[in-house]
Image (tube, rainbow, N blue to C red):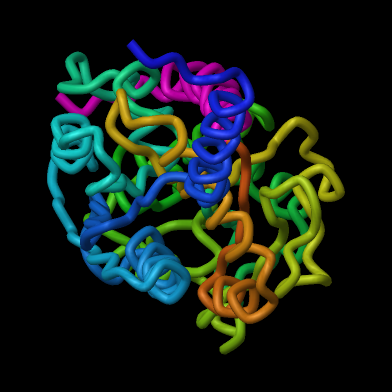
Amino acid sequence: MTRLRPWIIAALAACAAATLQPAAAQGPAWPEAPVHIVVPFSAGGAADVLTRILAERLQDKFGKSFIVENRTGAGGNIGMEAIKLAPPDGSLIGSATIGTLTINQYLFSKLSYDPAADYAYVSMIWENCNAFVVAAKHPAHTVQEFLAWSRKQPQGVNYGSAGVGTTPHLAGELFRHRTGINATHVPFRGAAQSMPALLGGQTDFAIDNIASYMPLIRAGQVRALAVTCPTRWPTLPDVPTMAEAGVPDFVVTSWGAFVLPKGTPQPIVDKLAAAIKAIAADPAVQKRFLDTGARTVATTPRETMAFAERERVKWKEVVTLSGAKLD
């Protein structure tokens, strides 16, 4: 048998290493085919609109189709189950939200998915803020004036929301608990029904999504007394935070995050997270998000999972206070 001399063996090893290095440097080949993004809510909502903006940019970045699908029902649970059951190969991304990842498990006695264990967390993708609003004809011009007014109402006050278990409902319950006012929740089928109720005086206040109420705020039909984010919102710079308005420990933000089915290879998770970080840094994307009422956010997979866990602690308390159940 012919023996290779040591220097030949070394040369062959060096050639092999040189051949492998470019492929390793390029990272995983993903995506090699069209990618589907499941939004667990109907078209036209904040999660849908913002996901479609990201899908456009991901398509530009990778040169592959990113197709948004709306799989609705059961407060987002149907879509989340579809994400859970998808092949863990990067062919399907889930556009999850604060509700599906941190609230639904406390509203439903049984979920067909485990929000903490059934997904590979990728990155947060957006966040938006709620605004404490009253009708323009309301006598209160500050939150403290509203509290003083509400305590003089013999039957208490009413607040509307887009339905039981929504963040506007739970934010209203948190406000009632923090301030001690007598407030009754009036649920509607959606913001399209709750907004006219506020304007018509059937409800006294709402703590709802800025994006939903911004047209009414700009038109002077409602007055924003505070925002529920930790700092002032860029498109409402003159509106104080809840803390500035005299209600401490009241931060309520809605948000979305990309997840993948559990078991998706980590290189795919990291590649998608890096792409989101690059897209979120683009001023043009930031402007499009702000125009929609949201901010771009990018976090590492580890940061995303840790943030969701902290949110679960907060929302478990709020749901318990509200007594809300959806089954």
Indicate left or right for 121 with 300 as reference.
left
269 over 162 or under it: above or below? above
Image spot of residue 326 (x, y percent) = 20, 29
Q: Is residue 159 magenta?
A: no
Query: Which residue is drawn at the image coordinates 68% and 39% (left, top)?
Result: 251
Image spot of residue 194 (x, y percent) = 35, 62
> Which of the image's four quarters has the C terminus?
top left
Query: Which residue is drawn at the image coordinates 29% and 71% (left, top)?
Result: 44
> Which of the image's four quarters has the N terminus?
top left
Query: Which residue is drawn at the image coordinates 50% and 37% (left, top)?
Result: 16
Query: Which residue is drawn at the image coordinates 77% and 38% (left, top)?
Result: 247
Q: Out of 8 and 165, give the one closest to the viewer.
A: 8
Image spot of residue 315 (x, y percent) = 50, 25
* Count of numbered circles in the view: 0
Residue most extreme to the bottom:
219
Q: Quadrant of residue 110?
A: top left
25 over 234 or under it: above or below? above
Q: Which residues are magenta?
A: 301-327
118 over 78 or under it: above or below? above
Indicate left or right for 125 with 297 as reference.
left
Q: Would residue 202 be seen by someone viewing this image from the given angle?
A: yes
Q: Out of 206 and 101, give the one closest to the viewer.
A: 101
Q: Out of 166 and 98, give the one closest to the viewer.
A: 98
Residue most extreme to the top:
1
Q: Quadrant of residue 234?
A: bottom right
Image spot of residue 30 (x, y percent) = 35, 51
Q: Quadrant of residue 299?
A: top right
Q: Out of 115 and 66, give the one closest to the viewer.
A: 66
Q: Would residue 169 be seen by someone viewing this image from the given angle?
A: no
Q: Is residue 309 magenta?
A: yes
Q: Main secondary structure of the magenta part?
A: helix
